[in-house]
Amino acid sequence: MDVNEIVGRYTPLANDTCCLSCGGAVDKSEVKPGEVCVDLGSGRGTDVLRLAEQVGEKGFVYGIDVTDEMIRKATSTAAKMGVENVKFIQADLEEIPLPEETANLIISNCTLNHVTNKRKVWSEIYRILKNGGRFVISDIYSSEPVPERICQRSGSSGRVLGWFGYP
């Protein structure tokens, strides 16, 4: 999916109440106080705000999203809640504007499946992750195109076709 398709699909949802997440990576992340965290595809910022509370005043959380409207909504929500240890950045995940070895933890929910150049995103994850850092990603993902016959089958979308995990 190219960036324009993503923006077109998700911009109208910025002010909606629907859930845009899958799998709950933040629930599995085992975040620690004082850590620096990054949420790839942060959307309206719900997981970023949850992480911000867990890392506390000595920690920090970045939310990265490609859609301007999601960044506006997330930034507004954080301001209304008085959360100051967060920053929302509009960026393509293939070029994350953070320095090397920034994050103790990177999470992502249902975002990598939309990225065209997945290899580049994995390189970016590696680049911004601190030595000994960890990532928790919940997604529906294929490294190769999914055959049309599977895409068109009723009920196929809910099946696990493979698993990648770290460590």
Image: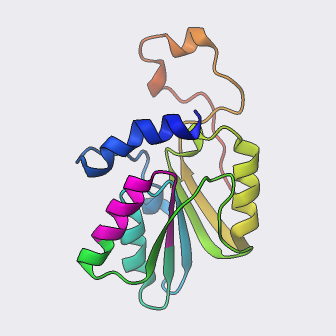
**Quadrant assignment for the C terminus:** bottom right
Residue 166 at x, y = what percent? Answer: 68, 55
Above or below, comparing residue 32 to residue 119 in the picture: below
Image side of residue 166 versus residue 67, left or right = right
- The reply to whether residue 102 is visible in this rendering is yes
Image side of residue 41 versus residue 133, left or right = left
Colouring used for the render: rainbow
Image side of residue 51 versus residue 16, left or right = right
Q: Main secondary structure of the magenta part?
A: helix
Q: Residue 106's image quarter?
A: bottom right
What's drawn in magenta, residue-wise? 62-77
Q: Residue 3's image quarter?
A: top right
Residue at 48% across, 85% down: 33
- The reply to whether residue 31 is visible in this rendering is no
**Residue 12 lies in magenta, yes or no?**
no
Q: In front here: 3 or 160?
A: 3
Residue at 72% across, 59% down: 124
**Quadrant assignment for the N terminus:** top right
Residue 136 at x, y = what percent? Answer: 57, 58
Q: In front here: 133 or 9?
A: 9
**Residue 71 lies in magenta, yes or no?**
yes
Residue at 28% across, 68% down: 77
Residue 83 at x, y = what percent? Answer: 33, 81
Above or below, comparing residue 106 to residue 31 in the picture: above
